[in-house]
Image (spheres, rainbow, N blue to C red):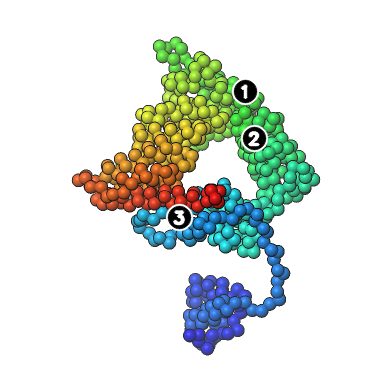
Amino acid sequence: MIRTSARADAPTSGAWEELVTTALLGTDRRTPPGHVAGQEATVTLLDTAAVQTVRRRAGLRPSPAAERPEPAPADLRPPLPAAAARRLAMLLADRPGTAGGGRRGTAPDLMELLPQWLQAANAHGFAAPPQALPALLDAARGRTDLRPAVLAFAGPRALWLARLNPDWRFALRATPGGAAALPGPEDADRIRRQWEEGLFAERVALLAAIRASRPAAARELLATTWVTERAEDRLMFLDSLRTGLGPEDEPFLEQALADRSRNVRATAAELLSALPGSALAARMAARAGACVAVDRTSGTPTITVEAPHECDARMERDGVVPKAPTGRGERSWWLGQLVEAAPLGTWPARLGGRTPQEIVALPVADDWQDELHAAWCRAAVRQRDAQWARALLGAPSAPGAGGPGAVSLAERAKLLGTLGAAERADWVAGFIAAHGLSEAFQLLGVCAVPWAAPLGRAVVDALNIARDAGSYPWSFSGVMGLAERCLDPAEAGRLDGLLAVPDEAEDASPGAGGYWAEAFQRLVTTLRLRSAMAEELGAAQAG
């Protein structure tokens, strides 16, 4: 019941925000709006809040009608099949935190399946149901990783809605021009005008779009304003040249080596070093080659290293950073940069005609092996050289879980990224078979989805071994979560034998068997749900 002493004429504009602020600060520090002398401040606060609550529920005061918005644009893509639309509503209704804390139980994590569902729906070219658009935009607002897929699926109507609701402004920022289509290649005047007058995000999107289809045209457009751009903008624009990078870009990048900004110079040098035929690559090859050689005087050929004694101005111009990080020796720092930037094709001729596998197998004198091999790892990733990546990875079953150059799991994951999807999966499957799952999470993250059959079997077998060992499943929760999203749904049948609660050994963790049965049940349920999702999205084509 509302007290009659409440100020019925309390101002409404911003009143609710004022009440909330007063409640947070306390009435002893801030007088509530509408307070009357002689009345307790807390009573005034509650009474005024009651009045404002009624006003907020009642609606708005009459006011002149605003201009009616333009109708939402049409989405001409085919509609979702009815079953798929129902599935989308179910996925969107599952919010983080709704299931409470503690054990996950056997229910699938639906929000973690939403990215996969969106990818499949976009691949089929379906339009989003209009009634699902607000929930889709809310989901993308809370999870930035969802935004590209959500905006592609939601189509032009998402931008129409974003102009009406400030909570969804991210859609306008993510789409340069707020739905304004990028000019076509034939519209040279509009391209030039948007490049010279557009917002930064619009210019980045324009340059990226042109670079994807016409690399030379994008480079020429960038050159027209290069000298007048801010350093941070030059850096972003230069990064767009990674797409379609080729020998034709070398003159422009060589010019950028003299840029005022150190970051721009470093990026230009990195791009040039990714072009094995560039003049910078040749200069780096000469410098690195002078530091590394094979000593044939001893019984076993050995790589010897003589790191640079100084970093001169020409090295700095070519992207070598002179100041070493704290705790790192200057000479090893310079050596690593030279070897990383030198074309990998330099080394067989320099080191006795040996193959990458033979070079990596050579001993390295004076404790330079880690530094040298780590630099070769970075070079293999930068130059996308699969042959060197294989040599540095070594056999997946090798002691130490990798080749001599794979100094960390992060390095191995990057090296695996240079290999084809099938070879990558086979290597990780071999790694898991030899070393188990304790170090496999980062490597699994670079494998194509759904996992190839050998990789899926290796993961399931390793989980089964961990269960039989009596470990708790949450020690492998990261891998189990990946399996739910990445295992081929066809593997669900192979897991039926793991759903029963096993007999616990005397040395097993108490209750571990029940937890494992629950985890495998969730995995099977999730795989079958993913299979159903694929069938629902394919229903239109099948019909």
Please tell me whether residue 342 is drawn above or below residue 454 in the rendered image. Answer: above
Residue 6 horizontal/vertical position (percent): 54, 85
Kindly state the secondary structure of the residue where label 1 is placed. Answer: helix
Assign a secondary structure to mark 3: helix
> How far separated are the C-alphas under marks 3 and 2?
38 Å
Which residue in the structure is indicated by mark 1?
Answer: 282
Q: Earlier in the sequence, mark 3 or mark 2?
A: 3
Residue farthest to the front, as pictured: 543
- Horizontal relation, residue 73 to residue 135: left or right: right
User: Which is closer to the viewer, label 3 or label 2?
Assistant: 3
Q: Residue at x 41, y 35 (%)?
A: 454
Disc 3 target residue: 110
Q: What is the crowding at mark 3: few (fewer than 14 residues within 10 Å), some, or many (at least 20)?
A: some
* Residue type, label 1: Ala
Q: Which mark is residue 427?
A: none
Residue 312 percent location from the top left of the image? 61, 27
Q: Earlier in the sequence, mark 1 or mark 2?
A: 2
